[in-house]
Image (cartoon, coloured by chain):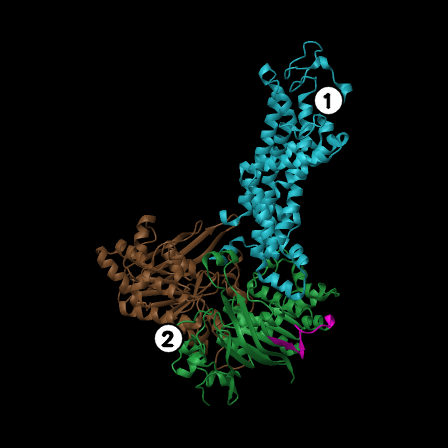
């Protein structure tokens, strides 16, 4: 096994408020191998975006990293100064957000934005940068790319805009891309185009991707491994076919089971009772226990095990599939 | 991100308390407690308003009762015994021997009454017109907002003077002094509704596209019911901020008009009237007749204004 | 079964021109957007009719015309044989109006934040001058909340609970038909199943009819008895779920089904669909789908296909075959 591109170790993010210190990310660890797509799923407020933002050093104050380490290609990046971090972003880590307009400057032509980004991070001449900008637009499938270099962001459709953002994220040849809900705002047919594009480009370049999304379908289609988050913690982590086909954590199991499936027909859907607790009022013990069918006294009192404690897949004392096989 | 921010407040699971308890544990009160500017300005406003309300009880003299006046007490300096009568006045007396401290207390009553009433008038007018403009749209909106634009191109003090002048022309001489206060209120109120209308229209445009308004429409609620019951409660917090800042402006506008001699009559002097009277004596050495009313006006207007600024920050989550 | 709703040749045009003065100064023509174009379908009583489509397909516009939030530009909406736009008897109109309710997409925007939950859910009855004593408690329990929740404000509830409140409000006037506009698309996956189950139960218990508007094919397949597929304001295919998902007839439906991400096909490599949805202000001539269609021929560019039966499916395509 090669060295991981990114290694997140026991990451804790805290938000101090006047009532309590909230932990939107609590003891999260994962590695990403070169060229791998790691899907991060969870409901809103599960901490999946917060984890990504912590990695790229874009936490909004007063949220801050309160513990753990982040290593990028053997270099520790969680303790870098803001200006050093800025160099890492863009050069080493590309970013794709849900709303393409947040990543594009509305006042600059697309070509200039690409060119500037390339010049800032790569040692090339202006002419060479221009050439690469054109190449980048062609690669993401923008028709008539040479003419579109002179267009402004608002002149593109939503899908085309997201393509431009992908070109921008990849033009400095980063080794890692963080894509935060990249297709949530797009229509089904455009979403399929963007996912296919992201998969193809990253495979060709060997770029690793953290794909943050709430859509299990997108995960199934794109990710190699998947991390399921619940209330700030990793509930389950494993290869995508194992997690989706034979989930171990009761939460993943409930989540997968509650999806209306093509094969299931019209029967009642399985449902998880209740909803995810808010950060300010997490229950004692395992955060999932009030909704868990298997919870016992132990789960109600002691925090659930971390992934390490259970030796890998699911952070739960009573993993689902093991029971069946035993 | 937004969901995490909602979570931070953690309101859902907070134990239920009484209304008052809820207020004291609210983020709003917490922010108030943490802001020295807010506390001090609130204290000053509260003190001055209370003093004005209780003027008949606090004031050592009734400055409008000719029987209690002694012309011999004229021009007594602050806290110094009068050369002829030996009477001492905390803040001195004016040319007619009226106690400056008492005239300030009574003057503040007039100033605050005119200020509050004018803002209330401007608020009701502006909020209603803003709601109608925002909700109904079309040519009604264009008409209301163009009138507002045109009015904004004139300084509001000129508008007030114009209204005041016209109203005075229509009032019989014997009622002029009585009517002056009310004319003043209408004049200042009419020159001040535009801000309310603009802000409420903007907020209404946002609210009317929300699904809860559509739900009310679908149920068959009429326009006025939707505007007053559904939209109005949701556009009130910016109105509160503007009302506070407008109060400071209205108090100053009243003082300005009275200073120029078109406001409160000398029989019912406001702080502005007192300043006008006082400035005549400034260069003859009787500085206290001007200085104390002026300082009171400054303290009042400044602290109301600071309170309004703080309120704006506190009620606008984006600035936090 | 009887027909509850019949929609005939429904068309809605929006004027999206710039203000008059700008238009005159910049010498621009009026810009008209046809959001819904000549759509006809019928909804049987006690069934779920689903409208699916991507953005700009006009699915929400149809829903709004059905509940009376928008007026049709052409065509008519008939409910139990009564055309609301033409009916003159106010009492009949009012009765029919109270038979139709709506569940909205965004549970955060659809409840007035300054109102107590009890007032929100009884408003449909109170607004008509009805008696609402005990109604709030009954409705809240019906949707799985507690009677005491009537005293609380919307911000005290989670997204899923708020959507239950929205459902309770829709039930208040004892409706026959509920238009559900993307009722679960703003909800988290684990909560979506709760709301869908609740809606199914209520439909069976109360004999409701749903017009279910969604972009999510898996949800639609689970809920619907009949599915209508919309593209650029036109109804291109109508079939029952099994027929639609196993043998889609219209090339757009085929493309949509192929593009939708699916949980049961891990690591699937798809040939992504070509092109994007065209500008609805200048839709393509003939069949609106022809620029993206693999089957398109000259006739598709010139003549708009009529809906016709191929087997049990209604489809608007010149080249669709059984």
Q: Pointer 2 and pointer 1: residues touching (CB < 8 Å)?
A: no
* Relative height, residue A149 to residue C189 (above, below): above
Tag 2 residue: C272
Residue B16 lies in quadrant: bottom right
Tag 1 residue: B61
Chain A hue?
brown
Residue B118 lies in quadrant: top right
- Please tell me whether residue B140 belongs to the stretch shown in magenta: no
Image chain in green: C
* Relative height, residue A163 to residue C225 (above, below): above
Q: Chain of mark 2?
A: C
* Relative height, residue C294 to residue B269 (above, below): below
For the residue labelled by badge 1, is the local secondary structure a helix, a strand or a loop?
loop
Q: Which residues are magenta?
A: C75-91
Percent across and percent down for residue B211 are 58, 62
Q: Chain of mark 1?
A: B
For the residue labelled by badge 2, is the local secondary structure a helix, a strand or a loop?
loop
Percent across and percent down for residue C79 are 65, 77
How far apart are the two marked residues, 2 and 1, measured between alpha carbons? 90 Å
Chain B hue?
cyan
- For the N terminus of chain C, give its image quadrant: bottom right
Percent across and percent down for residue A199 are 33, 70
């Amino acid at each position: 096994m090669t060295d991981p591109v990114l290694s997140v170790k026991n990451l804790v993010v805290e938000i101090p408020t006047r009532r309590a210190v909230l932990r939107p990310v609590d003891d999260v660890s994962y590695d990403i191998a070169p060229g791998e797509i790691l899907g991060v799923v969870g409901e809103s407020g599960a901490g999946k975006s917060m984890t990504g933002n912590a990695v790229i050093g874009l936490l909004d104050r007063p949220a801050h990293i309160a513990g753990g380490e982040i290593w990028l290609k053997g270099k520790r990046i969680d303790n870098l100064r803001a200006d050093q971090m800025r160099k890492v972003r863009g050069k080493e880590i590309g970013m794709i957000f849900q709303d393409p307009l947040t990543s594009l400057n509305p006042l600059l032509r697309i070509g200039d934005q690409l060119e500037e980004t390339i010049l800032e991070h790569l040692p090339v001449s202006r002419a060479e940068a221009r050439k690469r900008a054109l190449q980048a637009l062609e690669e993401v499938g923008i028709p008539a790319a040479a003419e579109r270099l002179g267009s402004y962001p608002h002149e593109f459709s939503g899908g085309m805009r997201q393509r431009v953002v992908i070109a921008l994220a990849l033009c400095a040849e980063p080794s890692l891309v963080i894509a935060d809900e990249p297709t949530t705002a797009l229509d089904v047919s455009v979403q399929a185009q963007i996912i296919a594009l992201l998969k193809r480009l990253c495979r060709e370049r060997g770029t690793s991707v953290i794909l943050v999304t709430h859509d299990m379908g997108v995960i199934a289609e794109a990710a190699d491994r998947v991390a399921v988050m619940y209330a700030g913690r990793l509930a389950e982590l494993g290869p995508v076919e194992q997690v989706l086909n034979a989930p171990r954590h009761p939460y993943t199991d409930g989540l997968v089971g509650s999806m209306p499936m093509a094969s299931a027909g019209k029967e009642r859907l399985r449902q998880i009772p209740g909803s995810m607790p808010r950060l300010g009022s997490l229950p004692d013990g395992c955060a999932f226990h009030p909704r868990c069918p298997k919870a016992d006294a132990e789960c109600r009192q002691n925090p659930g095990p971390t992934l390490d404690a259970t030796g890998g897949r699911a952070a739960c004392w009573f993993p689902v599939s093991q029971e069946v096989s035993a | 991100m937004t969901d995490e921010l909602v979570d931070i407040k953690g309101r859902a699971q907070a134990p239920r308390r009484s209304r008052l308890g809820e207020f004291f544990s609210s983020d709003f009160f917490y922010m108030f407690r943490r802001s020295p500017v807010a506390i001090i300005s609130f204290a000053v406003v509260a003190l001055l308003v209370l003093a004005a309300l209780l003027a008949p009880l606090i004031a050592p003299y009734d400055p409008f009762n000719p029987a209690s006046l002694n012309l011999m007490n004229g021009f007594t300096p602050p806290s110094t015994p009068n050369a002829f009568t030996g009477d001492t006045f905390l803040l001195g007396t004016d040319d007619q021997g009226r106690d400056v401290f008492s005239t300030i207390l009574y003057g503040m009553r007039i100033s605050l009454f005119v200020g509050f009433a004018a803002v209330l008038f401007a608020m009701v007018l502006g909020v209603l017109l803003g709601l109608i403009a925002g909700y109904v749209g079309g040519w009604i909106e264009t008409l209301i907002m163009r009138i507002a634009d045109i009015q904004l191109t004139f300084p509001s003090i000129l508008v007030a003077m114009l209204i005041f002048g016209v109203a005075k022309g229509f009032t019989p001489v014997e009622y002029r002094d009585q009517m002056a206060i009310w004319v003043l209120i209408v004049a200042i109120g009419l020159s001040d509704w535009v801000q309310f209308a603009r802000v409420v229209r903007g907020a209404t445009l946002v609210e009317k596209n929300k699904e809860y308004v559509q739900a009310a429409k679908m149920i068959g609620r009429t326009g006025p019911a939707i505007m007053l019951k559904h939209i109005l409660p949701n556009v009130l917090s910016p109105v509160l901020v503007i009302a506070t800042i407008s109060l400071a402006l209205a108090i100053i506008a009243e003082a300005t008009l009275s200073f120029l001699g078109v406001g409160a009559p000398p029989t019912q002097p406001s702080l502005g009237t007192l300043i006008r009277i006082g400035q005549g004596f400034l260069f003859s050495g009787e500085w206290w007749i001007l200085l104390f009313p002026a300082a009171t006006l400054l303290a009042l207007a400044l602290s109301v204004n600071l309170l309004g600024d703080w309120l704006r920050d506190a009620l606008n989550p984006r600035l936090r | 079964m009887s027909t509850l709703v019949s929609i005939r040749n429904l068309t809605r045009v929006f004027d999206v021109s710039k203000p008059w003065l700008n238009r005159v100064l910049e010498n621009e023509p009026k810009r008209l957007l046809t959001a819904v174009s000549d759509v006809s379908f019928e909804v049987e009583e006690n069934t779920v009719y689903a409208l699916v489509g991507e953005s700009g397909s006009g699915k929400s516009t149809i829903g709004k015309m059905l509940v009376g939030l928008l007026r049709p530009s052409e065509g008519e909406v008939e409910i139990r044989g009564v055309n609301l736009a033409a009916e003159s008897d106010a009492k009949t109109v009012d009765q029919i109006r109270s038979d139709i309710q709506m569940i909205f997409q965004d549970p955060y925007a659809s409840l007035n934040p300054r109102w107590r939950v009890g007032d929100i859910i009884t408003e449909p009855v109170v607004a008509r001058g009805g008696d609402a004593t005990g109604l709030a408690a009954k409705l809240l329990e019906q949707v799985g909340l507690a009677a005491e929740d009537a005293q609380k404000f919307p911000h005290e509830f989670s997204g899923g609970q708020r959507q239950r409140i929205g459902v309770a409000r829709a039930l208040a006037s004892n409706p026959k038909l509920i238009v559900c506009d993307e009722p679960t698309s703003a909800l988290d996956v684990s909560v979506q199943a709760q709301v869908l189950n609740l809606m199914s139960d209520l439909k069976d218990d109360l004999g409701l009819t749903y017009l279910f508007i969604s972009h999510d094919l898996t949800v639609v397949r689970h809920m619907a008895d009949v599915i209508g597929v919309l593209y650029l304001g036109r109804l291109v295919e109508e079939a029952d779920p099994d027929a639609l998902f196993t043998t889609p007839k219209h090339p757009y439906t085929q493309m949509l089904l192929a593009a939708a991400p699916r949980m049961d096909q891990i690591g699937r490599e798809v040939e992504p669909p070509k092109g994007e949805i065209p500008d609805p202000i200048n839709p393509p001539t003939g069949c609106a789908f022809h620029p993206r269609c693999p089957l398109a021929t000259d006739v598709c560019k010139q003549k708009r296909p009529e809906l016709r039966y191929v087997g049990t499916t209604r489809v608007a395509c010149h080249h669709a075959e059984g």
